[in-house]
Image (cartoon, rainbow, N blue to C red):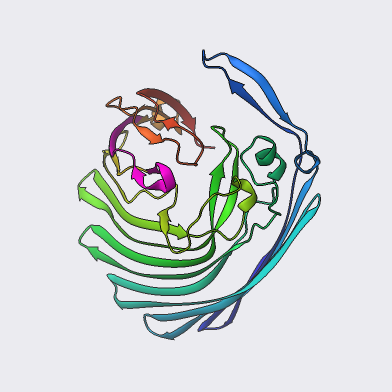
C-alpha cells in the first residue's frame, strides 16, 4: 500500500506499508553419489524441525518527503520501520529496526546531476530453519541454538551524471558497513544453503556507465564496476557449521559473491526494420578456496543478436523475429567452484535462441 500527497508546490509526501507472510515445510533428502558416478542411497532427514512448518511475518511502514529547496536543489528525508517474527518448531526470532534516510540532489546545469544519500537498512534472513538437515548430515553443530539475525547496515552513496553531446556518463561510489552481515553456507555439494551472520562486514565500490548514440542508427553502452565485500567473525547461524569451526575475530574474508572487476559493453545498429547487436562481458572471477582466499580465473564472453521488425504492409504488423547467439566464442568458463555458493557451476557453451514476438 502506497499513498502520495502533494502537500504544496514544494513538498511531495509519500506514505506506505507492506505485510508479508511466508511459510515453508516438507522433508529434506540428499542422494549421495558413489565413486563410479551412480546414485547412492538417499539420506532422509527425519528431524521434526525440518519436516514441520516454518513461518515468517514481516511488516514495514515508511514516510518520506521530497522538498524543493531552490531551483535544482531537492532534499529528501524519511524514516522506515521494519519488524519480523519468525516461528519454528522449538525456536523463534523477533527483530525490528527504525531506519532514517536522507538524500540531496543538485542540478548545477541542465546537463549535470549530483546526488548524495545516507540511510540505515534492514535485511532479514529467509524464514527457514535447516538445523536438523545440517546436523543429521554431519555438517552442523547440534549444541548451537537457532541464532540467525537480521543484517543492519549504514549505507552511503554519492554520484554524478553528465550529458556530453549524445552520451550520458554516470559515476557512482558507495560504502556499506554491516552488523550481522548475511552470507550463506552450503550443504555438502547441493543447492541447499543456510544463511549465517558475520559479526560485521563492509562493502564498497565504484560504478561507471555510459550510453548514448555514436552516429545515426548506432547506439552504444558500457559499464564497469569495482567491488570489495568482506566479513569477519561469526554472530549467527553457528548451527550450520561443525563444532570447532574457527571464525577468528578481526580476520576478514571475501564474500562468496564478490567479483572485484566486472565490465560489459555493447553496440547496436538499428536503421529501422532490422537491428544487429553485439555485447561483450568480462568478469574477474568469484571467490573460492578455504575462507574465500583464492579467486577463479577471469573470463570473457561475447553475445550477438540479429532481429527484424515486420512492416504493416507485410500483414504481420507488430511482429518481431530475432536470433540470439549466446557465448559466441564458446567459452564455458568457471562461474564458481566449491566456494559455498551453490556448488560447482560452469557457463553454458555456445547457444542459439530464436524468438518470435508480437505486440498486443
* Magenta stretch holds residue 293: yes
Q: Is residue 82 left or right of residue 115?
A: right
* Residue under the image location 38 percent in, 23 percent down: 351
- Quick check: 133 above or below 329? below
Q: Is residue 307 left or right of residue 237?
A: left
* Residue under the image location 72 percent in, 28 percent down: 44
Residue 258 percent location from the top left of the image:
40, 50
> Which span of residues is magenta-colored?
287-307
* Residue under the image location 44 percent in, 51 percent down: 255
Let me know if residue 68 appears in the view. yes
* Residue under the image location 46 percent in, 34 percent down: 318
- Quick check: 142 above or below 161? above
Residue 346 percent location from the top left of the image:
40, 30
Task: Farthest residue to the front: give it.
Answer: 244
258 or 198: nearer the viewer? 198
Which quadrant holds the N terminus?
Answer: bottom right
* Magenta stretch holds residue 171: no
Amino acid at each position: 500500500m502506497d499513498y502520495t500527497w502533494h502537500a504544496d508546490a514544494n513538498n511531495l509526501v509519500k506514505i506506505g506499508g507492506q505485510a508479508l507472510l511466508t511459510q515453508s515445510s516438507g522433508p529434506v533428502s540428499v542422494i549421495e553419489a558413489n565413486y563410479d558416478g551412480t546414485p547412492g542411497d538417499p539420506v532422509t532427514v527425519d528431524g521434526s524441525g525440518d519436516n514441520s512448518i516454518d513461518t515468517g511475518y514481516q511488516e514495514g511502514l515508511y514516510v518520506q518527503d521530497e522538498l524543493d529547496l531552490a531551483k535544482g536543489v531537492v532534499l529528501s528525508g524519511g524514516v522506515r520501520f521494519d519488524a519480523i517474527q519468525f516461528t519454528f518448531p522449538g525456536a523463534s526470532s523477533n527483530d525490528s529496526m527504525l531506519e532514517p534516510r536522507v538524500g540531496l540532489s543538485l542540478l548545477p546545469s541542465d546537463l549535470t546531476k549530483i546526488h548524495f544519500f545516507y540511510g540505515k537498512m534492514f535485511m532479514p534472513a529467509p524464514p527457514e530453519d535447516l538445523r536438523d538437515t545440517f546436523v543429521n548430515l554431519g555438517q552442523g553443530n547440534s549444541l548451537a541454538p537457532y541464532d540467525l539475525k537480521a543484517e543492519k547496515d549504514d549505507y552511503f552513496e554519492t554520484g554524478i551524471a553528465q550529458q556530453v553531446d549524445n552520451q550520458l556518463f554516470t559515476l557512482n561510489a558507495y560504502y556499506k558497513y554491516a552488523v550481522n552481515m548475511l552470507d550463506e553456507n552450503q550443504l555438502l555439494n547441493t543447492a541447499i544453503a543456510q544463511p549465517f551472520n558475520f559479526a560485521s562486514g563492509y562493502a564498497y565500490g565504484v560504478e561507471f556507465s555510459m550510453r548514448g548514440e555514436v552516429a545515426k542508427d548506432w547506439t552504444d553502452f558500457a559499464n564497469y564496476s569495482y567491488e570489495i565485500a568482506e566479513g569477519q567473525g561469526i554472530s549467527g547461524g553457528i548451527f550450520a557449521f561443525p563444532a570447532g569451526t574457527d571464525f577468528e575475530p578481526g580476520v576478514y574474508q571475501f564474500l562468496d559473491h564478490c567479483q572485484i572487476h566486472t565490465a560489459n559493453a555493447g553496440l547496436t545498429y538499428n536503421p529501422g526494420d532490422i537491428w544487429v547487436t553485439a555485447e561483450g562481458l568480462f568478469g574477474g572471477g568469484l571467490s573460492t578456496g578455504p575462507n574465500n582466499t583464492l579467486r577463479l580465473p577471469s573470463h570473457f564472453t561475447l553475445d550477438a543478436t540479429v532481429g527484424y521488425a515486420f512492416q504493416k504492409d507485410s500483414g504481420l504488423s507488430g511482429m518481431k523475429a530475432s536470433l540470439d547467439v549466446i557465448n559466441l566464442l564458446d567459452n564455458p568458463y568457471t562461474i564458481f567452484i566449491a566456494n559455498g555458493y551453490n556448488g560447482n557451476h560452469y557457463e553454458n557453451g555456445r547457444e542459439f535462441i530464436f524468438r518470435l514476438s508480437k505486440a498486443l
